[in-house]
Amino acid sequence: MSDAQGAGDVILAVEGVTLSFGGVRALNEVSFDVREHEVRSIIGPNGAGKSSMLNVINGVYHPQQGTIRLRMDGALREFHDMDPHEVALSGIARTFQNLALFKGMSVLDNIMTGRNLRMHTNLLLQALRIGPAAREEIEHREAVELIIDFLEIQAYRKTPVGRLPYGLQKRVDLGRALAMEPSVLLLDEPMAGMNVEEKQDMCRFILDVNDQMGTTIVLIEHDMGVVMDISDRVVVLDYGRKIGDGTPEEVRGNQAVIDAYLGVSH
Amino acid sequence: MKQHIGIVSVGVLLLAGLVAPLATGAGTPGFYTEVLLGGLMAGVLYSLVALGIVLIFKASGVFNFAQGAMVLFAALSVARMAEAMPLWAAALLGMGIMVLVAIVIERLVLRPLVNQDGVVLLMATLGVSYFMDGFGQTVWGSDIYSIELGIAKEPVMILEGVFQGGILINKDDVAAALVAALLVALLALFFQKTSTGRALRAVADDHQAAQSIGIPLNRIWVIVWSVAGVVALVAGMVWGAKLGVQFSISQVALKALPVVILGGFTSVPGAIIGGLIIGVGEKMAEVFLAPVLVKTFDLAGGGIENWFAYVLALLFLLVRPQGLFGEKLIDRV
């Protein structure tokens, strides 16, 4: 396996993960690792287990076998049966394939919820916006404004998210995840249902996040062109098994991958 | 467009009902104002119960049938504890008890039933409702108890210069209205300005997304049921001070159902305004509409207060199922 450019130590390790729903094996002894600062993609045909993999990392599903380990305070630590909110606490953020935004709330409030974990002042002070609570609110608001600028959605700050067009909603989803300042960002088909321009914008944002903020990115994507362009390394899943792992060039030349995507003549 | 015609006609009907007694001279302005105020007072109580229901529905999607029982339980607790200690201490202790109730409900009812159908959860709260009705009496007894807020009961005459004969109002009614207003203002601050409030709104919109950004669902449920419990306590104390703490509180609190249908299941202002509309509406109907009905159709009369709210709610279900301020649900097909 070749070293990805500029990638550091392993930050997230998936080891022998098996996940079954009744008799269906969604994931079968899947192992791979993610290194710091890289863009790591998970691809595969429909039903390959990509989203299941993401949901395992995110704590939505607990695998029957295998472990997930995450670098925390300098050491890889196994996390065992963690709930999604505990996973979030340990520094993993995610976006959703089918938008899961807080539709009734404004863009600003949506992204502010991403800072919730970091707000610690007393309820009463917050309600009255006095003293340390006011300072804290301003401090987090500044961080959120930076994200809003970064995603170029300044004009929609106060708009309820439900009223924004799809492409912009996707950006808000990304913004909310960024507000958590995660060490690993899981993106579940961020380009799904977008037109070419929107896809290009989203690609640019993802690469900028990776570059400027140094965030490690795990990306699930259908669009092969996009994946090959922006990924450092790619994992290929098919029927819940890993069939390929390597740089985009390596994966592109892998016969098993070609068969899975194009079909084999029997 | 058809929607608008429906809602406008119901609105016109309500307004017509409001001004008709004055226009036809069925009551003197003074008497009319008294009825109006009486209706508003009853409405405040309905609003307080409805508020608890809306809070829980917003955050967990559960229609809490037990809100009325929680009101009764809280009122009973405060009334009985106040026999042994000052009222403020009893109220504080009562709040503690309601938080405890919230924790127990989350642990024993909500957590095991998470992800079940709305109907299952509704049935569960129905069970909780009957349990709390009974359990409250087991613990605290089933007589009629009183809560003394320390406000003079005798009515005061006001506006004698404006209306002939003036208007009689109760000081404790005014106090109740003030308390309700204060509570709503506090809740608004809590929901809009605090990070916990933001988390509550987030959970209300999307459970999964809220968890993914580190909001613990279980703790949020405990918080929201606790807040609803405290709202129930305030409603119970106000109600108990006015009418005495007795089993019927739990039944009358069912009027909150038409209130939330009217105001919308997800709207705090809707709960308040819906409560006031129902309160005023049924008093007006009882006092002014009933005699007309009796005269025209030769009926026995009476009892309008019992069904008026529900008929109004039915009307609303026909023309505006999401209520006055509720979110319109559009499912993408």
Image (cartoon, grey):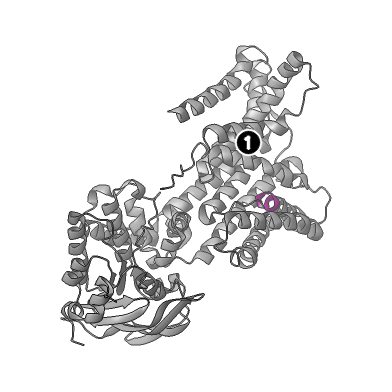
Would you say B242 lies left or right of B265 here? right
Q: Secondary structure at mark 1?
A: helix
Instruction: Write down the quadrant of residue A170 in the picture.
Output: bottom left
Report the quarter where the N terminus of chain A lies. Answer: bottom left
- Where, by quadrant of the figure, is residue A26 drawn? bottom left
Query: Does residue A118 show up magenta in the picture?
Result: no
Q: Nearer the viewer, residue A10 or A266?
A: A266
Q: Is residue A138 above or below residue B214?
A: above
Along the horizontal axis of the image, is B250 left or right of B7? right
> Relative to residue A229, is residue B244 drawn left or right?
right
Foreground residue among A177 and B154: A177
Question: Can see residue A102?
Answer: yes
Residue A227 horizontal/vertical position (percent): 21, 70
What residue is drawn where x is 32% and y is 81%? A242
Q: Is residue B12 above or below residue A179?
A: above
Residue sitting at 30 percent across and 74 percent down? Answer: A184
Q: Where is residue B112 shown, x and y percent of the image? A: 60, 67
The residue closer to the viewer here, A84 or A137, is A84
Q: Residue furthest top?
A: B24
Q: For the point 55% across and 51% down, which residue is it?
A: B57
In percent of width and height, residue B26 lies at: 68, 14
For residue A22, above or below residue B183: below
Q: Which residues are magenta?
A: B67-71
> Pointer 1 indicates a residue of which chain?
B
Task: Quickly name the residue at label 1.
Answer: B43
Amino acid at pointer 1:
Gly
Question: Which corner quadrant holds the C terminus of chain A?
Answer: bottom left
Task: Say which residue appears at 62% left-offset and 61% top-offset.
Answer: B102
Residue B117 in the image, given as x and y percentages of width and height: 57, 57
Residue B84 appears in the rendering: no
Q: Nearer the viewer, residue B31 or B49?
A: B49
From what the image shows, is residue B289 above or below residue B139?
above
